[in-house]
Amino acid sequence: MILRPRQKLFVERSLTALKQHQNTLGVAPTGAGKTIMLSGVTGQWLAGEDAKACVLAHRDELTTQNEAKFRRVNPSVSTSVFDAQAKSWDGQATFAMVQTLGRDSNLKNMPTLDLLVIDEAHHAAAPTYRRIIDHVRDRNPKVAIFGVTATPNRGDKKGLRPIFSNVSDQITLAELISSGHLVPPRTFVIDVGTQGELSQVKRAADDFDMTAVDAIMNKAPITDAVIRHWKDKAHDRPTVVFCSTVNHARNVAEAFIAAGFSAELIHGELTTAERQAALGRFQSGESQIIVNVAVLTEGWDFPPTSCVILLRPSSYKSTLIQMIGRGLRTVDPNEHPGVTKSDCIVLDFGTSTLLHGSLEQDVNLDGHEGLGEAPQKECPGCGAMVPAATRECSLCGHVWERTESEGKVDLSDFIMSEIDLLKRSSFRWCDLFGDDAALMATGFEAWAGVFFLAGHWYGMGGGKKQPARLLAKGDRTVCLAAADDWLNEHETEDAANKSRKWLNQTVTAQQLRYLPPAYRKDFGLTRYQASCLLAFQFNKRDIQSRIFNAAERREAA
């Protein structure tokens, strides 16, 4: 398996910070491939050493998922699992469930560790985690501790500073949007006569005073205006709504239903069964809108969701990013046939985007990828070293206020330079017919392609043991990202290096035997180009069939 270029950089920066500080936290949102990067860091730390690592997770399914992905990234490193079913330290890397490992009897039998890795590291300040961390440090004061999370700021406001002294790297949503791994937001900041009042609401201990927000936003004329704007801009999209209080959410859901739309209500007072039933109706398409209060901010994803409505402000940029992120996931056409998603409409009726600026505010918009060490600054709140572009400290929650010179940028001005995956890929992409409408890349075990038909792009992948399958449809960048990830998943760095050598080698006689006669007169044809042409020729019928079927489903939808 091959890591994406940005994943490789994340791994390099994390390893550098670990060697310098003996601990570090990496921050990356959903879609960045946290488990893959975690595996890259752990595997390289263990490489060539007689060392022992433990990877912590807080659910059994995460423990098994992490081990499976780790083995794909590091096939030569032995692994074992320590959870309720299996309690083994035999592997060089052991994947443990926190609740099981944290028991006294299990801690006593834990071997001395050289590296402790904490998945979903925002949990690291919890007592169960601290018992394990303190025990590991007592056994080996020189142990390295690495954490990775998408949501570093905890709801209980317990900072991560006692565990981590620095943040090695932070991948932003904007980077993933520019690389095609998330869809872009189209954001509208809409004042329904409440922005002046909302700007005067005071912050409570961990956020704005939501009771005061309710008093401003929970009014029938305001809700009616919200629904009018939604009908104008996103009436046909699966939509998630974030409200200030349960009463506010209930009134909003009832207003949507009264307007003739199907809506669900989710909040913390519902039972697990009631929540699951409501989510099931939304995900099946029985309901179009799901209204919630602080339940779907993190840990929930339904990729077809393509509209986010913000009816509450957020004092933390991380919370804003979490809410908007619910609508930015790309869609797997095999899981959701007939669904095409190229963007997400964000309707902000509060003041969050005006307060925090655009999602891409913290990255370079000129199309240059940052390489090497990330510029850092010291947090005045806790003294931690964090990436220089950080607006909110991942360890203590300190917020750097925007200055007048930075202005007030809203997300309706979203401009992002597309990262050219054709140049950044580990494989060479060939323009099959010279019209930029059919691109192919190939390795030893797999092939991938992107194709343009009737105004839309389609990403395809297949291989020796993999039948052709549709990977993505819609935006060119999203399709390229999905196709490139397919190759990365099924090939190795060694295969990529060998295939690149074919770029300088002449087409072979064996290849010419299977190519159409016209190519036999192309004396500039390389072995790699011929390989791509043959991959297309051998799979042409399957490629065309799946693309035409997807196009028909699109038309039917």
Image (cartoon, rainbow, N blue to C red):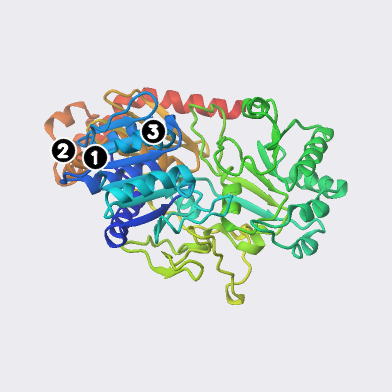
Point 69% across, 55% down: residue? 313
Q: Which mark is residue 63?
A: 3
Q: Which numbered disc covers residue 507?
A: 2
Q: Amino acid at mark 3?
A: Thr
Q: What amino acid is found at the position of numbered circle 2 in the picture?
A: Val
Answer with the quarter of the image where residue 17 lies. Answer: bottom left
Residue 416, image x, y percentages: 50, 57
Q: Is residue 234 above or below residue 338?
A: below
> Which residue is at a point 37% across and 62% down the rendered structure image?
370
| Percent x, y of residue 296 | 62, 40
Looking at the image, residue 363 sits to the left or right of residue 188; the answer is: left
Q: 310 or 422: which is nearer to us? A: 310
Residue 182 in the figure: left or right of residue 486:
right
Which element type, helix, strand or loop, lies under badge 1? helix
Determine whether 469 is above or below 198 in the image: above
Pointers 3 and 2 in contact (C-beta within 8 Å)? no
Choose between 232 and 3: the one closer to the eye. 3
Q: Which mark is residue 38?
A: none
Residue pointed to by mark 1:
529
Q: Position of residue 260 (x, y in %)?
A: 81, 32
Q: Residues within 10 Å of mark 3 (few under 14, many from 20)?
A: many
